[in-house]
Image: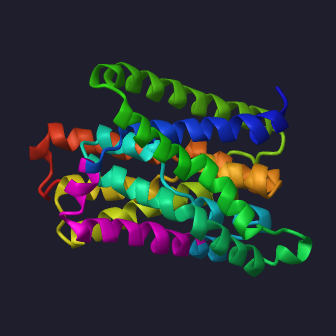
C-alpha cells in the first residue's frame, strides 16, 4: 500500500471514525456534571490552548531542531485531544467526565484556532518564504470534516439507538477504530521509515520532552490548586496526550509536507512510553498507598 494512499485517503477516514466513536460515548449528562465545577474545565482548557503551545515554542528555541521538525512539534501542540487521552484517563481512574469534556471542547475550537496559530508559526519559522502556507478556511473545512462533524454524528446516533443496540455497538466500534488507528500509524511509520530520524535524535528528544513536560505541568498546576486527585489525573493526561492523527492529517493532507508529518508520527508512537510509565506509577500508588507520604495525585 502506497504512502500517499495511507496518508491522503485512509488516515482521514480512520480519524473521522475515531472521533465518531468518541461522539458515541458522549452524553449531555457528562457535560452537565463537569460544568458544576467550571474551574477545572477552565484550567484544563487554558493549559491545553495556551501553556502547551508555549512549552512547544520553548523547546523549539532550546533545541536546534530543523525548521520542518520544529513546525511538526508546534503542530502537535495545537491539535485537539482524542479518544486516546480519554482511554488513559479511564485506566488511571481519573475524572472521565472532565477528560471527555476537555476533549470535546478541544474538538470544537481546534478547527478554528489551529489554522490561524499554525499559520503564524510557519511565518515565525521563516517557512512561508519557502512557499509553505495553510489556507485558513480550507483548513477549517477539512478539520471540521474529520473532527467536529464526526463527533456530532456520533452523539446524534447515540440518541436514536436503543440501549441494547448501543451496548452492543459501542465496544465494537471502539475496538475497531482503535485497532484501525494503530494500524495506520504503524503502516505510516513503516512507509516513511527511510525518512524518519534515528531513534537517538533531537526529534525524539523533542517529542518525549513535550509529552513529559506537558504531563508534569498539568499535574503540578492541578495539584497546586488542590483539585481532587481524579481531576488531577484527567488534566495530567489531557495536557500531555495530543491527537497525533490530526497533526499527521494536517501535515500530510493539507500542507502536503511529509517532512512536517514525521514529528507527529514519532510523537504518536513515543508518547505511549511516558504515559504508560506514569499510568503504572498511579496504579502502583493506589495499590500501595502506605508507600508514599504525600497524598495521591
222 magenta-colored: no
Location of residue 23 with respect to 135 vertically, above or below:
above
Q: Which residues are magenta?
A: 29-56
Quarter of the view holding residue 77? bottom right
Q: Which residue shows up at 40% across the image and 37% down it?
A: 24
Location of residue 192 with respect to 246 vertically, above or below:
above
Quarter of the view holding residue 284? top left
Residue 152 is left or right of residue 9, and the answer is: left
**What colouring does the structure picture have?**
rainbow
Quadrant, the N terminus: top right
What secondary structure do most residues of the magenta stretch adopt? helix
Q: Which residue shows up at 81% across the image and 54% down it?
A: 259
- On the image, the x and y values in percent for residue 113 come to 58, 70
Q: Which residue shows up at 34% across the image and 52% down it?
A: 99
Quadrant, the C terminus: bottom left
- On the image, the x and y values in percent for residue 145 come to 63, 49
45 magenta-colored: yes
Q: Which residue shows up at 55% across the image and 63% down it?
A: 110
Amino acid at each position: 500500500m502506497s504512502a500517499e494512499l495511507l496518508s491522503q485517503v485512509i488516515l482521514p477516514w480512520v480519524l473521522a471514525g475515531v472521533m465518531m466513536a468518541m461522539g458515541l460515548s458522549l452524553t449531555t449528562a457528562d457535560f452537565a456534571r463537569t460544568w458544576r465545577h467550571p474551574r477545572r474545565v477552565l484550567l484544563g482548557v487554558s493549559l491545553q490552548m495556551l501553556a502547551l503551545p508555549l512549552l512547544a515554542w520553548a523547546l523549539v528555541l532550546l533545541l536546534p531542531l530543523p525548521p520542518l521538525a520544529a513546525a511538526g512539534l508546534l503542530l502537535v501542540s495545537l491539535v485537539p485531544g482524542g479518544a486516546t487521552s480519554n482511554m488513559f484517563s479511564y485506566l488511571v481512574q481519573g475524572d472521565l467526565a472532565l477528560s471527555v469534556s476537555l476533549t470535546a471542547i478541544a474538538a470544537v475550537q481546534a478547527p478554528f484556532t489551529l489554522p490561524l496559530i499554525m499559520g503564524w508559526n510557519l511565518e515565525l519559522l521563516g517557512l512561508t518564504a519557502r512557499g509553505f502556507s495553510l489556507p485558513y478556511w480550507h483548513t477549517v473545512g477539512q478539520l471540521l470534516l474529520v473532527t467536529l462533524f464526526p463527533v456530532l454524528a456520533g452523539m446524534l446516533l447515540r440518541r436514536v439507538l436503543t440501549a441494547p443496540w448501543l451496548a452492543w455497538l459501542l465496544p465494537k466500534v471502539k475496538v475497531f477504530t482503535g485497532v484501525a488507528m494503530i494500524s495506520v500509524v504503524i503502516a505510516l511509520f513503516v512507509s516513511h521509515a527511510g525518512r524518519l530520524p534515528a531513534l537517538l535524535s533531537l526529534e525524539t528528544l523533542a517529542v518525549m520532552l513535550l509529552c513529559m513536560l506537558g504531563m508534569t505541568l498539568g499535574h503540578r498546576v492541578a495539584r497546586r490548586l488542590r483539585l481532587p486527585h481524579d481531576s488531577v489525573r484527567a488534566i495530567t493526561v489531557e495536557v500531555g496526550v495530543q491527537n497525533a492523527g490530526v497533526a499527521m492529517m494536517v501535515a500530510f493532507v493539507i500542507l502536503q509536507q511529509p517532512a512536517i508529518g514525521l514529528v507527529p508520527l514519532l510523537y504518536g508512537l513515543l508518547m505511549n512510553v511516558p504515559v504508560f510509565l506514569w499510568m503504572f506509577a498511579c496504579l502502583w500508588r493506589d495499590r500501595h498507598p502506605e508507600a508514599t507520604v504525600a497524598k495521591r495525585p
